[in-house]
Image (cartoon, helix red, strand yellow):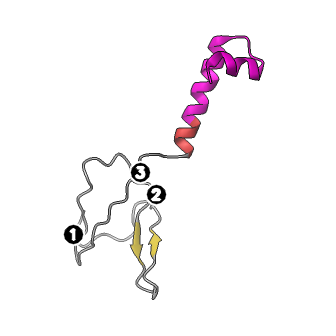
Amino acid sequence: MTVQELMEKAGINQTGRAIMYIKEALSEIAVISPTHTTTTRIDIVKDQRFYQVPNDALRMLDLRCKDHDNDDGLYQSIPRSIYEPQTQDADGK
């Protein structure tokens, strides 16, 4: 479908405004529905705090870990902390 066809269907006669609406709609779609996502699994190691994130990662959508109280072996999302932890870490970092 061309911009002209969209303009006719929407009843818009200003090309610049129609293109602006199309760009805004595409931006909203990109925010709501992320594409080209991959899943990477990293095994956790006892007493290891930091892990290497893959170089091609742009952002993390979800971080999951097996719950120790979980008998089914299901992964549970780890909530993001927005505040500084109240207890100091043993390694001081």
- Is 19 contained in the magenta span? yes
Query: Label 3, on which residue?
Result: 37
Percent of width and height locating residue 39: 37, 59
Query: Label 2, on which residue?
Result: 82
Q: Is residue 38 left or right of residue 20?
A: left
Q: Between label 1 and label 3, give the one nearer the viewer.
A: 3
Tell me which amino acid carries mark 1.
Asp
Inter-mark Cα distance, 1 to 3: 33 Å
Query: Label 1, on which residue?
Result: 91
Quick one: 59 or 30, which is closer to the camera?
30
Percent of width and height locating residue 28: 58, 37
Q: Quadrant of the N terminus?
A: top right
Tell me which amino acid carries mark 2.
Ile
Inter-mark Cα distance, 2 to 1: 21 Å
Callout 1: SS: loop
Kindly indicate whether the residue at mark 1 contacts the one at mark 2 (C-beta within 8 angstroms). no
Q: Earlier in the sequence, mark 2 or mark 1?
A: 2
Rendered view: 86 above or below 53: below
Q: Between label 2 and label 3, give the one nearer the viewer.
A: 3
Percent of width and height locating residue 55: 24, 48
Tell me which amino acid carries mark 3.
Thr
Inter-mark Cα distance, 2 to 3: 24 Å
Most common secondary structure along the magenta stretch: helix
Kindly indicate whether the residue at mark 3 contacts the one at mark 2 (C-beta within 8 angstroms). no
What residue is drawn where x is 63% and y is 18%?
A: 3
Q: In which quadrant of the rendered view does residue 92 lie?
A: bottom left
Q: Is residue 56 left or right of residue 73?
A: left
